[in-house]
Image: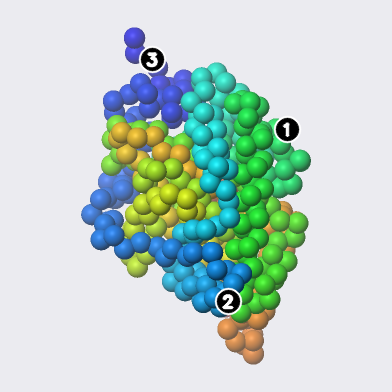
């Protein structure tokens, strides 16, 4: 019996019953994951070893941060301090969550981008024209006690494992923020101090196998609106980063995280560290799971360029961006369909 795909909310429930991509997922020819656009030379983003960060080679590692953040805005980290067991448990419970029966999963479904815990699909079903081959569960997780009771209670270990993971990744982020702050030539707590009470969101992304992966995206090219993203991915490739006019595939390395700069880092650093385009492609035979942690200012925090980083303080308007609250930025981000042009441009100080 042919099941109807139109009544399905989630792409994972469509994927299992189609042998072609439904038309609502098909991109225009000029907007597809064209394989010839992708650099397969094996060059990848830098890998930074955090082992010696608090030892005598700190200066050297900070230098690696400065290079990675200014030239790529994307890097991988190893010896990051998040226990292997914590990572493994998180990945397993995410997989179990998405493999539950549809009736259990859809309890969490919402298209309301303001909800602090919700399962949805694509990017923003309310504003986009073409859908993406992705389902995602989004969670707010700082402070944990404010949100944990809205998180899924199935699988039964979901809350405990996710809380443990979020706490551990947060500790790592605080270390990264100090290193990044120093690499910008700022006091090590400066970046952290611009974030108000701090915010932390997570997504569990599920990219089901796709019968025609060259016609659609898991996530099209975009920049993250937050400060920094720490991404955990399983062993299936899919992430690509835009660098010097080419897309570079970032293949998974076990027990590493991928770190990227988001829009708030670009604003705080006054363009020294840019938010960079990245995207996720899908494939025809394997499901892929990725778990980004989006670290951000709290909604009431006022974000703006740090004065030490202004290129020329004598000039009238050396700051490229005006100050704003993160609430204002975040709302603007979700109101748009996920677009290549960054939302950041609307916060630029006009030069005229
Ligand atoms: C994101 C993202 C990449 C991936 O969720 O913002 O860029 O590989 N994900 O899933
Ligand atoms: Ni992203």
Q: Could you say where residue 327 lies in the image, as x and y percent from the top left?
A: 69, 53
Mark in front: 2 vs 1: 2
Mark in front: 3 vs 1: 1
Label 1 residue SS: helix
Residue 42: quarter of image: bottom left
**Crowd band around label 2 with a 10 angstrom C-alpha radius: few (<14), some (14–19), many (20+):** few
Residue that lies at the very extreme toward the left in this rendered image: 36
From mark 2 to mark 3, how far is it between C-alphas?
Answer: 62 Å
Residue 21 drawn above or below residue 171 = above
At 28% from the left and 42% from the top, the residue drawn is 214
* Residue that badge 1 annotates: 149
Residue that lies at the very extreme toward the top in this rendered image: 1
Residue that lies at the very extreme toward the front in this rendered image: 56
* Residue that badge 2 annotates: 56
Residue 278: quarter of image: bottom left
Q: Which mark is residue 3?
A: 3
Q: Which mark is residue 23?
A: none
Closer to the camera, 32 or 45? 45
Q: Could you say where residue 308 lies in the image, as x and y percent from the top left?
A: 65, 81
At 28% from the left and 25% from the top, the residue drawn is 19
Q: Could you say where residue 329 lies in the image, as x and y percent from the top left?
A: 63, 56
From mark 2 to mark 1, how far is it between C-alphas?
Answer: 43 Å
């Amino acid at each position: 019996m042919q099941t109807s795909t139109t009544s399905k909310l989630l792409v994972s429930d469509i994927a299992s019953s189609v042998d072609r991509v439904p038309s609502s997922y098909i991109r225009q020819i000029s907007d597809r994951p064209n394989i010839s656009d992708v650099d397969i030379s094996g060059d990848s983003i830098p890998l930074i070893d955090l082992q010696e960060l608090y030892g005598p080679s700190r200066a050297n590692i900070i230098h690696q941060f400065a290079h990675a953040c200014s030239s790529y805005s994307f890097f991988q980290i190893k010896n990051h301090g998040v226990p292997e067991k914590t990572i493994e448990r998180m990945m397993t419970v995410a997989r179990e969550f998405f493999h539950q029966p549809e009736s259990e999963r859809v309890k969490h479904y919402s298209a309301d981008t303001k909800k602090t815990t919700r399962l949805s699909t694509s990017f923003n079903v309310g504003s986009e024209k073409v859908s993406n081959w992705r389902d995602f569960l989004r969670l707010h997780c700082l402070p944990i006690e404010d949100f944990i009771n809205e998180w899924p209670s199935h699988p039964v270990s979901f809350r405990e494992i996710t809380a443990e993971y979020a706490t551990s990744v947060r500790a790592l982020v605080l270390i990264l923020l100090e290193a990044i702050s120093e690499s910008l030539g700022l006091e090590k707590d400066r970046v952290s101090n611009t974030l108000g009470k701090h915010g932390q969101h997570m997504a569990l992304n599920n990219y089901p196998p796709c019968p025609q992966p060259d016609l659609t995206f898991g996530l099209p090219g975009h920049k993250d609106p937050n400060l920094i993203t720490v991404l955990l991915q399983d062993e299936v490739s899919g992430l690509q980063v835009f660098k010097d006019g080419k897309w570079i595939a970032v293949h998974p390395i076990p027990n590493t995280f991928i770190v990227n700069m988001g829009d708030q880092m670009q604003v705080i650093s006054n363009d020294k560290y840019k938010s960079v385009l990245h995207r996720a492609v899908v494939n025809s035979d394997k499901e892929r799971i990725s778990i980004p942690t989006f670290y951000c200012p709290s909604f009431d925090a006022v974000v703006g360029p740090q004065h030490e980083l202004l290129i020329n303080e004598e000039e009238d308007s050396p700051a490229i961006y005006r100050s704003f609250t993160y609430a204002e930025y975040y709302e603007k981000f979700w109101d748009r369909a996920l677009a290549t042009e960054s939302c950041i441009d609307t916060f630029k100080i006009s030069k005229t």
